[in-house]
Image: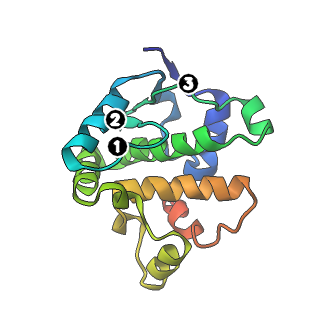
Amino acid sequence: MPRRRLSPSEVREAQVVFASELPYHRVWIHESARWPNWLASLGSALFGTPPPAGGNAITLGYSCYFPHRLRTADVDFEARIFGDMAWLMHELTHVWQYHHIGGSYVTKALRSQFGKGLKAYDYGGLAGLQSAAAAHRSLNDFNPEQQGDIARDYYIRLKLSLSKEAWEPFVAEFRGA
């Protein structure tokens, strides 16, 4: 399975979410990895849930494993193709978690996934973030998968010029603010 470091384009894009709070030089991207999809299929069979429609990615420490090559080159961004970069943002959130709290993020993520299935990713969208902000909640009040989707959705909203106001206080925490 081919592995590589983050490209300059990927680093530039990731900095809009994580600023300097991610050790970009330590991240490995493993593309065309089959085992994350196999693992997702096994989990789906065990828990009676559908497998992820677009494939499954897994991040362990500083390594992100994807089932296919990512479309994250400048030419993709110029063509307004942001899906794979948004997926990478979710996985880079797990790198951020590992860097800041250690391997315990894996246990927390698995506990969320096994306990809630696909609902483990649901942070409530705009209304959920507004409610969390009103209750003075922080990023730590969301599970690791919800944090990943907050980063992903923020990135997509940024690229599509949609309002990001509700996401800003939580993304600021990724940046160390």
**What residue appears at the point 58 percent right and 73 percent down from the top-left corner?**
166
Question: Which type of secondary structure does the marked residue at label 3 adopt?
Answer: loop
Q: Nearer the viewer, mark 2 or mark 3?
A: 3
Determine whether the residue tagged by mark 1 lies in a helix, strand or loop: helix
| Residue drawn where x is 64% and y is 32% of the image | 72
| Residue 169 seen in this snapshot | yes
Q: Is residue 29 above or below residue 11?
A: above
Q: Is residue 39 above or below residue 151?
A: above
Q: Residue furthest bottom?
A: 134
C-alpha gap between disc 2 and disc 1: 6 Å
Q: Position of residue 15 (x, y in %)?
A: 61, 45
Asked whether 40 or 148 is in front, the reply is 40
Q: Amino acid type of disc 2?
A: Gly
In the picture of the structure, the residue carrying the numbered disc 3 is 69
Among numbered discs 2 and 3, the one appearing first in the sequence: 2
- Looking at numbered disc 1 in the image, what kind of residue is underneath it? Tyr
Mark 2–mark 3 Cα distance, whole angstroms, equals: 20 Å
Q: CA distance from mark 3 to mark 1?
A: 23 Å
Mark 3, other Cα within 10 Å: few <14 / some 14–19 / many ≥20: few
At label 3, the amino acid type is Arg
N-terminal of the two: label 2 or label 1? 2
Residue 146 in the image: state x and y as whole percent: 41, 59
Mark 3 or mark 1, whichever is nearer to me: 3
Q: Element under label 2?
A: loop
Residue at 77% across, 30% down: 75
Tag 2 residue: 61
* Relative to 90, 70 lies left or right: right
Could you say which disc has been placed on residue 98 in the image?
A: 1
Residue 40 falls in which quadrant of the image? top left
